[in-house]
Image: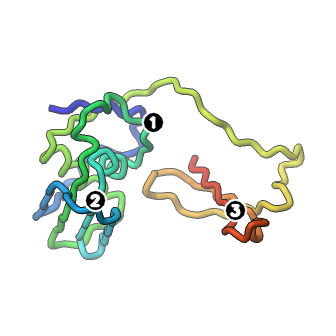
């Protein structure tokens, strides 16, 4: 049995008790050198993951980042896998599909998850202007971040960089 601690509040990455599960699922080791591919189509009840590590699949299933995983020294977590899963009925949302993936991981990998709150160092981004305005090359836009169960604010620099590269983006989910 693999025990994994996830240091996130219980409201993020709900328990896999959605009541719906994938009817057919295939989990295989990936031996190719192809790039990682993910296709989640809730309306078709279909999930295809190719070339992703077990650790990355867990992160996606629970909507967490790598630093939120504890006890990750198992070599199994670095194995690349392919998952094809489907159900006959449409799935209501990506969040429900994540819950179904959580159930699949518990079934196939005997994954046991323990949630706990931990104190950690954090980086806080604050607006430098006392009046709350963003810098002249920044603009604020809102976007949905439902998969994480949070609100998201995206700050994007405007205009091309001096080297002609695409502008840098910074996503903040809170």
Give percent across and percent down for residue 62: 35, 47
Dot 1 or dot 2: first in sequence order is: 2
Dot 3 or dot 2: first in sequence order is: 2
Q: CA distance from mark 3 to mark 1?
A: 25 Å
Bin the neighbour count of mark 2 within 10 Å (Cα to Cα): few under 14, some 14-19, many 20 and up: many
In contact (CB < 8 Å): disc 1 and disc 2 = no
Q: Residue at x 24, y 47 (%)?
A: 79
Query: Is disc 3 placed on a helix, strand or loop?
Result: strand
Give percent across and percent down for residue 82: 21, 60
Dot 3 or dot 1: first in sequence order is: 1
State the quadrant of the N terminus. Answer: top left
Q: Is residue 25 above or below residue 1?
A: below
Bin the neighbour count of mark 3 within 10 Å (Cα to Cα): few under 14, some 14-19, many 20 and up: some
Q: Residue at x 68, y 64 (%)?
A: 141
Q: Quadrant of residue 161?
A: bottom right
Q: Residue furthest top?
A: 119
Q: Does residue 3 appear to the left or right of 40 in the view shown?
A: left
Q: CA distance from mark 1 to mark 2?
A: 21 Å
Disc number placed over residue 156 in the picture, else none? 3
Disc number placed over residue 51 in the picture, else none? 2
Q: Residue at x 27, y 67 (%)?
A: 91
Query: Is disc 1 placed on a helix, strand or loop?
Result: helix
- Which residue does the numbered mark 1 point to in the structure image? 67
Give percent across and percent down for residue 157: 74, 62
The mark lying in front, picked from 1 and 2, is 2
């Amino acid at each position: 049995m693999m025990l994994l601690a996830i240091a996130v509040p219980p409201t993020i990455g709900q328990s896999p008790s959605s009541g719906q599960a994938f009817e057919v699922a295939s989990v295989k080791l990936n031996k190719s050198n192809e790039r990682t591919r993910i296709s989640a189509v809730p309306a078709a009840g279909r999930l295809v993951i190719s070339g992703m590590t077990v650790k990355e699949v867990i992160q996606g299933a629970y909507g967490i980042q790598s630093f939120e995983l504890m006890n990750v020294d198992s070599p199994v977590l670095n194995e690349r896998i392919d998952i094809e899963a489907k159900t006959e009925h449409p799935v209501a949302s990506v969040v429900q599909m994540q819950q179904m993936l959580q159930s699949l991981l518990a079934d196939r990998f005997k994954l046991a998850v323990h949630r706990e709150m931990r104190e950690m160092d954090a980086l806080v981004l604050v607006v430098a202007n006392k009046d709350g305005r963003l810098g002249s090359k920044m603009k604020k836009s809102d976007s949905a971040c439902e998969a994480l169960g949070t609100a998201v604010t995206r700050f994007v620099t405007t205009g091309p960089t001096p080297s002609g590269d695409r502008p840098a983006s910074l996503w903040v989910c809170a």
